[in-house]
Amino acid sequence: MPIEQQVMSNVRAERVRRVAELANRKHREKNSQFLIEGPQAVREALTWQPQIVRDVYVSADGDEPDSPISTATLGKLAAQAMRENIYVHKMTRDVEHKMSKDAQGIIAVADLRACRERLERVPQTPHPFIAAFWQVRDPGNAGTVIRSADAAGCDMVILVGDCVDVFNPKVIRSTTGSLFHLPVLTLSEDEFFELCHEKKTSIIAADVYGTQKLPPVSLPELERDRQLLAGGKAVLFGNEARGLETGLLDECDMVVSIPIYGKAESLNLATSASVMLMSIAMSSRVETMESR
Amino acid sequence: MPIEQQVMSNVRAERVRRVAELANRKHREKNSQFLIEGPQAVREALTWQPQIVRDVYVSADGDEPDSPISTATLGKLAAQAMRENIYVHKMTRDVEHKMSKDAQGIIAVADLRACRERLERVPQTPHPFIAAFWQVRDPGNAGTVIRSADAAGCDMVILVGDCVDVFNPKVIRSTTGSLFHLPVLTLSEDEFFELCHEKKTSIIAADVYGTQKLPPVSLPELERDRQLLAGGKAVLFGNEARGLETGLLDECDMVVSIPIYGKAESLNLATSASVMLMSIAMSSRVETMESR
């Protein structure tokens, strides 16, 4: 329905500048808007939360020379947006590149406050499965771990302490749309522990070393703990470089480490999170099936 | 012992040009040399395969302003190289940046033929655990999956068909040294299947869809297959974008998929490989312990 027939071609236009500025947190907060780049993230936003999407910008120049994204894909997304009564604008490649370097032909601008309000809705699941990340700083890592938590069927993600902004476009791109699938809260350390106590979840720290009080249990051991797996559980992962602080570890109920069988020293955050969350998810489901 | 006291400072020197050229495959093959960048990969090469390392270049300018790598770390690595009678050269930051953009203060040049000869030694383990990757094209992905295979205790990695060159500096950096821990072969499709038949391993394709002949089995189901886990096994992963071709799938013994519990569409190659390989490793070890 509402499509601007005129192709946006002026890279100096006010509108173009305003969209480009959303790469910056200050502008996102001030205008209560954020950027969604690329066909996959835009499709998931349109599918799961169309009401937050304000405008969609589609390349009028057809396929990028080396792009895996076809004009047909972009056309379908534009049609989907129009069915939701979202404004669709056509743009030249120059305008696209001015707005975003990673758009692959399509950009959406969405309402930040409306999205945050949905993201922060704590689900009322009786025994929630929570993935929590303390001081995750790299946007690519943050996005990837949100995607892994989604795949593992987590009920919510909590970014604990001083983490990267979830509305950073690179975070959103790396989630490949998972940000529109499940609640993602940003909480202080105290708020995180309070929520876990309130929800009566076990708090499992993912850490190689543990503390004197809490030496690490191996992941396969955790997978055999039927009682723990049957209940609510929050898994807390540490910062990419520094892991978790002793003070935080000691507030958890147990420390779990992934066994390393070869000569590799360790796994990185994204790998650890996917292995730990998927293993717990698979074991919990198997336990549930068997105990029926 | 052999350390050049003079600091290399001429960015136009023949030696600097030759090291920088190793970013290019043609030059690597012609000179039978390759680059190892950064403290972690250099340390693993010096620890596990010192005999292949020819020269080590260390920054004489101390810490990079934002670098997490301390001068002490670099000094220790230089000392380790000298104990192995490897030539250590000091260089200015300009020379370092000319040789490599990702060195973090230290670069090694190693003998390609000697390394390849070691990489291609097929281990004589009776029931090998093999990780195989078909047409993996992205250097970062290739490195990450080699690291995951190492962590899972695989006996070897096989790059099948038209894959990225393992001596690409970005592959080596992403392995964080795992390239020096286990054999990594590059084989054609036919050679891969021949080797598996010769080693009598089950061939497990990691794929979401499977084929008409081989519909996918879920990973938790595979984890309960004691007989299969007790024997040799090769897990074959597909290309980042296209997965595995039907022809290849049908040559495998079974197709296994990772269950997705949330709304995420899929996992990427690196995540799938780490989840699948670590799950199989953990289940195999548990089975072995229990059957004792």
Image (spheres, coloured by chain):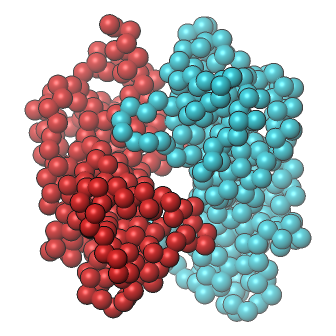
Chain colours: A red, B cyan
Residue A254 in sight in this render? yes
A123 versus B90 height, above or below: above
Residue ID at (65%, 59%)? B139
Count all numbered tags in the image, as a single digit.
0
A122 versus A115 height, above or below: above
Q: Where is residue B188 in the image (x, y as percent from the top left)?
A: 84, 44
Residue A172 in sight in this render? no
Residue ID at (64%, 66%)? B37
Q: Where is residue B128 in the image (x, y as percent from the top left)?
A: 74, 27
From the viewer's side, name the closer residue of B108 and B155.
B155
Determine whether, in the image, residue B194 is placed left or right of residue A95: right
From the viewer's side, name the closer residue of A99 and A207.
A99
Determine whether, in the image, residue B73 is placed left or right of residue A91: right
A130 versus B188 height, above or below: above
Q: Position of residue B96 (x, y in %)?
A: 63, 80
Q: Quadrant of the N terminus of chain A?
A: bottom left
Specify the quadrant of the image occupied by residue B58. Answer: bottom right
Q: Position of residue B280 (x, y in %)?
A: 58, 26
Residue ID at (44%, 42%)? B265
From the viewer's side, name the closer residue of B124 and A50.
A50
Q: Quadrant of the C terminus of chain A?
A: top left
Residue ID at (71%, 63%)? B168
Specify the quadrant of the image occupied by residue B291. Answer: top right
Specify the quadrant of the image occupied by residue A88. Answer: bottom left
Determine whether, in the image, residue A142 is placed left or right of residue B285: left
